[in-house]
């Protein structure tokens, strides 16, 4: 069974593509507005992707679901995916607080793998959202997943993905342990950079006071 064999799939995949464009525009506007207003944006960079057909089919198998358009649309919520990479952990929660207030997004679920990392050390916050897509025959709320992580978390996750998948998910136990240790090191690096940022801000504030 291939996705292209499903009647109407081309139209459906276009809806995910359009929803992703809408989401990208919202985030780009936000990024520019924050930079103009505050001189700093919590958004470092953004990537978008549509889930590969093979990955959709595999996920349907994992969930023991028959591959029908209805099942895919209702059960696979990360076909449209966006990754927002931030400098600091606090930036991630700042963006989430903003997203919660928007009337043009529905937050369906928040999976906080920073508060509770996966056993292998994976950290990120995943938001399952619905994006309104205004079409000629009405508005459809399309599912998308937004992954938010710091640069250190992104570095770890991208390399772990390459290593793990290159070897078909078979790695010796000690390598598994070392990958988990590397995730902890990424977390410590985030903490360190945040602490340095605080010290720089404090230093600048004290200098300003001494001038007055
Ligand atoms: P792709 O298409 O390659 O991006 P659920 O929807 O809750 O039933 P799901 O989708 O497995 O289950 O939920 P989860 O674990 O919250 O999110 C999966 C996605 O998060 C993955 O996409 C990765 O992008 C990322 N991810 C989750 N765990 C890990 C991990 O241990 N290492 C890395 N590198 N990334 C991870 P996919 O499924 O790989 O698909």
Image (spheres, grey):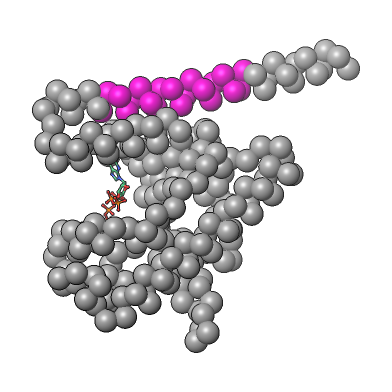
**Residue found 38% across the figure and 32% down from its top:** 155
Is residue 71 shown above or below 41?
Answer: below
Q: Is residue 95 magenta?
A: no
Left or right: residue 92 compared with residue 65? right
> Which residue is found at the position 83% from the left and 12% from the top?
210
> Magenta stretch?
180-199
Picture quadrant where residue 177 is located:
top left
Q: Is residue 186 left or right of residue 7?
A: right
Residue at the spot 48% in from the left edge and 40% down from the top edge: 85
Q: Does the stretch in magenta take in 189?
A: yes
Residue 163, quarter of the rendered image: top left
User: As rendered, which of 185 and 137 lies closer to the eye?
Assistant: 137
Q: How many marks on residues?
A: 0
Q: Is residue 73 above or below residue 146?
A: below
Q: Position of residue 69 (x, y in %)?
A: 27, 76
Expressed as whole percent of the image width and height from the top left, the position of residue 183 reads 32, 28
Nearest the eye: 2 or 91: 2
Residue 117 pos. (x, y %): 32, 37
């Amino acid at each position: 069974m291939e996705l292209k064999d499903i009647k109407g799939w081309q139209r459906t995949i276009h809806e995910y593509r359009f929803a992703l464009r809408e989401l990208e525009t919202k985030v780009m506007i936000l990024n520019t507005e924050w930079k103009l207003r505050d001189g700093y944006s919590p958004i470092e960079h953004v990537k978008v992707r549509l889930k590969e057909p093979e990955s959709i089919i595999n996920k349907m198998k994992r969930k023991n679901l028959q591959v029908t358009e209805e099942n895919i649309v209702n059960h696979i919520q990360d076909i449209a995916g966006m990754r927002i990479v931030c400098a600091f952990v606090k930036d991630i929660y700042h963006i989430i607080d903003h997203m919660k207030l928007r009337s043009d997004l529905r937050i369906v679920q928040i999976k906080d793998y920073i508060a509770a990392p996966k056993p292998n050390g994976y950290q990120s916050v995943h938001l399952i959202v619905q994006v309104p897509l205004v079409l000629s025959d009405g508005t459809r709320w399309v599912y998308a997943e937004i992954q938010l992580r710091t640069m250190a978390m992104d570095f770890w996750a991208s390399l772990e993905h390459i290593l793990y998948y290159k070897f078909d998910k078979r790695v010796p136990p000690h390598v598994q342990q070392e990958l988990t240790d590397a995730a902890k090191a990424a977390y410590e690096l985030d903490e360190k950079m945040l602490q340095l940022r605080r010290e720089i801000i404090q230093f600048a504030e004290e200098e300003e006071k001494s001038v007055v």
